[in-house]
């Protein structure tokens, strides 16, 4: 039996595709192989979030000091708040312990890839526009304006898809977790091809645009 993957695993993809859910499930299933990388952020904790579990919550000044002192492996500003991966989360990979799983945005993933950490990056896609929008709006606590804003950012992230190599479509969660685990361990199986990803992305983009127009109350564009 192999000692398991030794490369940090990065899950990227537009908001609402299920990255956090997949990362949590992966760690619950194989705590010997995977551990969550806890990021630092300046955003406020949401109800139910605990400092140090979902994020380390810090002030803007503290975050800027972390940047200046080189304590972050990558960082990005998302919706006006800072998010970053502490460099120490990517250290100590030569031993037998679990590898870190990072749920970060595409800007952060690009920075980590440039640093040559050997990270394995998987772009997660939703199975279709309707399910994606349902999941994205799922908390039910956000205003139509806030959901439209999340969708606009998500569209930007979706546009980055062609620059990635490995894709998993998150339809059934258990199957997704199995695929992610197999990919990270170097077993690829049947993966979506670039042409299939392009078709899916076009459908997702069209669905998201139409939902944004509906949420913004704007008149429909001519086809
Ligand atoms: P992200 O981290 O990519 O923004 P989340 O992990 O927060 O996405 O998931 C968004 C919503 O979708 C959550 O309510 C989650 O429970 C739900 N979800 C994630 N994966 C699946 C799946 N395979 N089937 C059904 N619902 C899912
Ligand atoms: P949320 O506020 O919903 O938890 O996260 C907002 C966005 O920030 C998500 O796209 C998430 O992947 C991203 N994010 C979370 N932590 C980090 C991080 O450490 N670095 C970067 N670059 N993005 C992050």
Image (tube, rainbow, N blue to C red):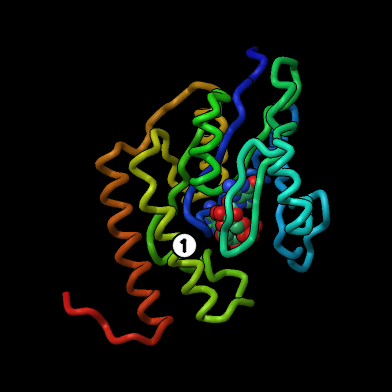
Determine whether, in the image, residue 117 is placed left or right of residue 162.
right
Determine whether, in the image, residue 41 is placed left or right of residue 125.
right
Locate the C terminus and report the quarter of the image it occupies. Answer: bottom left
Residue 138: quarter of image: bottom right
Q: Quadrant of ligand 1?
A: bottom right
Q: Which residue is drawn at 69% across and 43% down?
A: 67
Reading the image, the residue beneath label 1 is: 153
Q: Is residue 50 above or below residue 106?
A: below
The answer to whether residue 118 is seen in the rendering is: yes
Label 1: how many residues lie within 10 Å, few (<14), some (14-19) or many (20+)? some
Q: Residue furthest right?
A: 51
Q: Residue furthest front?
A: 68
Residue 140: quarter of image: bottom right
Q: Residue furthest left?
A: 223
Determine whether, in the image, residue 94 is placed left or right of residue 201.
right
- Percent across and percent down for residue 123 are 46, 42
- Percent across and percent down for residue 141 are 64, 77
Q: In this view, does 64 lie above or below 49?
A: above
Q: Which residue lies furthest to the top in this view?
A: 1
At mark 1, the secondary structure is: helix
Q: Is residue 149 above or below residue 115?
A: below
The answer as to whether callout 1 falls within 8 Å of ligand 2 is yes
Locate the N terminus and report the quarter of the image it occupies. Answer: top right
- Percent across and percent down for residue 182 are 53, 28
**How many callouts does the rendering have?**
1
Q: Which residue is drawn at 61% across and 29% down?
A: 8
Determine whether, in the image, residue 175 is placed left or right of residue 49.
left
Q: Judge by depth and name the residue closer to the eye, 137 or 111.
A: 111
Q: Which residue is drawn at 54% across and 75% down?
A: 146
Q: Is residue 199 above or below residue 34?
A: below
The answer to whether residue 37 is seen in the rendering is: no
């Amino acid at each position: 039996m192999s000692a398991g993957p030794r490369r940090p695993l990065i899950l990227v993809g537009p908001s609402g595709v299920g990255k956090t859910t997949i990362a949590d499930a992966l760690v619950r299933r194989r705590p010997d192989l995977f551990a969550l990388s806890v990021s630092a952020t300046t955003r406020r904790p949401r109800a139910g979030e605990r400092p140090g579990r979902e994020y380390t919550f810090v002030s803007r000044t503290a975050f800027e000091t972390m940047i200046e002192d080189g304590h972050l492996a990558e960082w990005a500003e998302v919706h006006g708040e800072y998010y970053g991966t502490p460099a120490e989360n990517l250290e100590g990979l030569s031993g037998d312990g679990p590898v870190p799983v990072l749920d970060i945005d595409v800007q952060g993933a690009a920075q980590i890839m440039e640093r040559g950490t050997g990270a394995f990056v998987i772009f997660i896609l939703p199975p279709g526009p309707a399910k994606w929008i349902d999941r994205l709006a799922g908390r039910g606590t956000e205003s139509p304006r806030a959901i439209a804003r999340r969708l606009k950012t998500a569209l930007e992230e979706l546009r980055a898809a062609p620059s990635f190599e490995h894709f998993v479509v998150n339809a059934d969660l258990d199957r997704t977790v199995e695929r992610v685990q197999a990919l990270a361990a170097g077993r690829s199986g049947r993966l979506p091809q670039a042409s299939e990803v392009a078709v899916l992305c076009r459908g997702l983009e069209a669905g998201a645009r139409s939902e944004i127009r509906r949420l913004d109350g704007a008149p429909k564009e001519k086809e």
